[in-house]
Image (cartoon, helix red, strand yellow):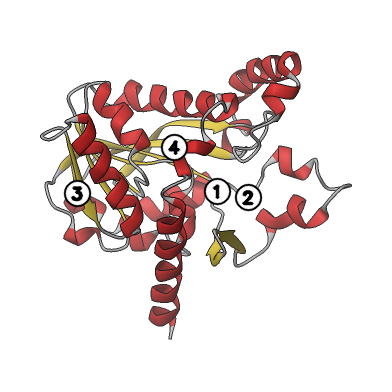
Amino acid sequence: MESEKSNRQFRQVADAFSRKAGVYDAFGQDHANLQRMREKVYAQVARWTPSGSHILELNAGTGLDAVTLVERGYRVHGTDVAPGMVDEMQRKKRVLGLDGRFSTQLCSFTELGNVAGGPFDAVFSNFGGLNCVADLTAVTRHLPQLLKPGGVLTWVIMPPICPWELALLPKDWRVATRRLRRGGVMANVEGVQFQTFYFTPGQVQKALGSAFQTVQLTGLSIVTPTADNDSFARRRPGLFSWLVRLDDWLGERPLFNRIGDFFILTARYDPE
């Protein structure tokens, strides 16, 4: 029963994001906060993953991040459960001439035993793709076969506490408290519904196990708008700039680095 529920969840996720593939990249255009968030993620990847490393990307989507990482000197194997997203990755690889540096594979992150090309120097997942699974151990159990000893993972995950959403409490309590509901909440992408779950850094570390040591934890968009807000920076540029500086300062501080629209967790794999 639980297996069928999980399979249905991933069929819905694959359907939703296949439908989204054709318009996904357009949302990020002229979206100053989303671009800033991506650069924060890339900076943390670069800090712990040397140029030239071979990266396995989970929920790689349209390949937007993968292409950027390739352009910055990495090799990337991009995986996704949505056929439409993998088709878009393959199109980009062909158009940009990235053969040999960018490979793709249709694969769920709960079936990583099927991944080709490993072991890898790093495993990367951006912007909450892993929030589509109820139990992170369904992903982490594969990591010892995928990561080289001393390799790292950098995962960008949505936590339960998002100050920007909580501030909406007087206006819309459902949105303000959605991350706090036990058992996750229903998301709707392109008319398809599926469950979304929220994790604390402690829950991620527990799922990773003792062989992984967190080396950097950064809160992302603690006081700046959430990633789905593409208008605030244009409407209030002065306030947005001030909030960005505050967000950058808070993001590295204890407690604050555990909350926000996302957190960026980098952990090193050190098997006994």
- CA gap between label 2 and label 3 equals 28 Å
The answer to which of marks 2 and 3 sits earlier in the sequence is: 3
Residue drawn at point x = 44 percent, y = 37 percent: 265
The answer to which of marks 2 and 4 sits earlier in the sequence is: 2
Do the numbered discs 4 and 3 sit on residues whose CB atoms are within 8 Å?
no
Residue drawn at point x = 66 percent, y = 37 percent: 229
Q: What element carries label 4?
A: strand
Residue drawn at point x = 47 percent, y = 61 percent: 16
Alpha-carbon neighbours of circle 2 within 10 Å: few (<14), some, or many (≥20)? many
Direction right: furthest residue: 170
Please name the residue that numbered disc 4 is placed on.
265
Alpha-carbon neighbours of circle 1 within 10 Å: few (<14), some, or many (≥20)? some
- CA gap between label 2 and label 4 equals 15 Å
Please name the residue that numbered disc 1 is placed on.
200
Q: For residue 160, which numbered disc appears in the image?
A: 2
- CA gap between label 4 and label 3 equals 18 Å
Q: Which amino acid does label 1 sit on?
A: Thr
The answer to which of marks 4 and 3 sits earlier in the sequence is: 3
Q: For residue 146, which numbered disc appears in the image?
A: 3
- CA gap between label 3 and label 1 equals 24 Å
